[in-house]
Image (cartoon, grey):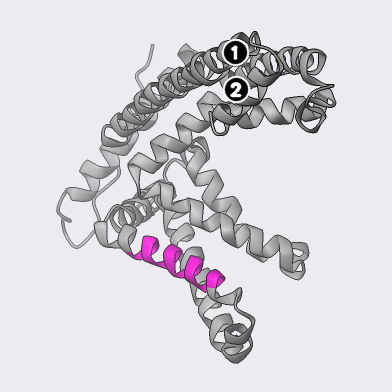
Amino acid sequence: MTDPRPAGRRRMKLAARCRVATEAPAFGLVVFCVILLNAALMGVETYSGLAAEYQRLLRTAEQCCLALFSLEMLLRVGAFADRPKAFFRDPWNLFDLAVVASAFVPFVRENTTLLRLLRLARVLRTARFLPHLRILLIAVGRSLPGTASFLFVGGLVLYVYAMVGWVCFAESDPGHYGSVGRAMLTLFLLTTLDGLTDAVRAGLQISRLSILYYASYALLASFVLVNVLIGVVLNSLDEAREIEDAADRDRKQPGPPPAAGPDTDVRDRIATARRALDEIEASLPAQDGRPPRRLEPSHSSS
C-alpha cells in the first residue's frame, strides 16, 4: 500500500521553485525595468496629443505592465507557500500586494484620479530593488516622531519672534510685520538666510537694536534648530541601517519565527524535524518500483 504524497511536501517544492525564480538577479532586473516603464507611460499620458494619438498602444502597454506585476506577486506569494505567515510579516510585501491588488478593485478601476495615484505608488516599489533607497525610506519613517517634536519647537520659536517683530516693526514695516501671520511668514522665509541682508538693513533704519533681533533669530532658527533636525535624521538613518542589516541576516539565515511560548517553540521544532525527514525520504531511491515509505512516528508504550 503506497503512501500518498503529503500536501506539505508539495508546498515546499512550490516554495522552493518560486524562491529560485524570485531570488534570481534577472527577475529583479525585469521587475525594475517594468516599474520604470510604468512610470514612463504615466509621463507620456500627461501630453494630451500623444495620449490621444497612441491611446490604444498606451492602454495595451499598461495592461501588460499590470499582468507582469500580477505574475510577480503570484511568484512572491508562492515563495512563501511553506510559511504563509512570514509573507505578511514583511511590510514591503504588504505594500506591493496592496498596490498591485488595488488595480482589480471595482471602485478604484472606475475612479481615474485614484487609479493614477495608485499607479504612481508603483514607482515607490523601486525601493525593494535599491537597498540604499529602502534605507532612506525607512529612515524617513523612523524620523517622523522626532520631526514632529522639532516642528512644535520650531513653531513656538517662530511665533515668539513673530510677536516680538510685530511689536517692534509693525508701524514702520507693515508689509512684513503688520500682523502675526505676516511676521511668521517673513521669519519663515528668513530661516534659509535668503534675504537676511536686506532685512537687517531695513531693521537698522528703524533701530540699531534690530541687529540683536535678527542675529539671535538666525543663530537659533537657522543653525541650532536645523542642526537638531539633521541630528534626528542621521540618528534615524543609523537605526534604519541596523534594521536593514538585521533583515538581511534573517533572509540569509532563515529560521522559525520567535515563539510566543514554550509550546509553540516545541511545535516549530517538531515541524522542522518533519520537513527534514520528508526531504530525506524524498531523496532516497525507490525500491521495487514503489515510492519510498514515509517514516511514521514510533509510539512507545509507557
Magenta span: helix, strand or loop, mainly? helix
Between 227 and 1, which is closer to the camera in this rendering?
Answer: 227
> Which residue carries the number 1 mark?
211
Query: In terms of image quadrants, where is residue 136?
Result: top left
Residue 10, percent from left and from top: 38, 53
Of the 4 image quadrants, the one containing the C terminus is: top left
Q: Amino acid at mark 1?
A: Ile
Which label number is shown at residue 293?
Answer: none
Q: Please state the extent of the stretch shown in magenta in the rendering.
A: 30-43
**Percent x, y for residue 204?**
64, 18
Q: Give the side of residue 158 with respect to residue 94, left or right.
A: right
Residue 33 vertical placement versus 211 (above, below): below
Residue 229 position, x and y percent, is: 51, 21
Which residue position is annotated with label 2? 200
Which residue is rendered at x = 47% and y = 33% of the image?
138
Q: In the displayed structure, would residue 278 be above or below residue 193? A: below
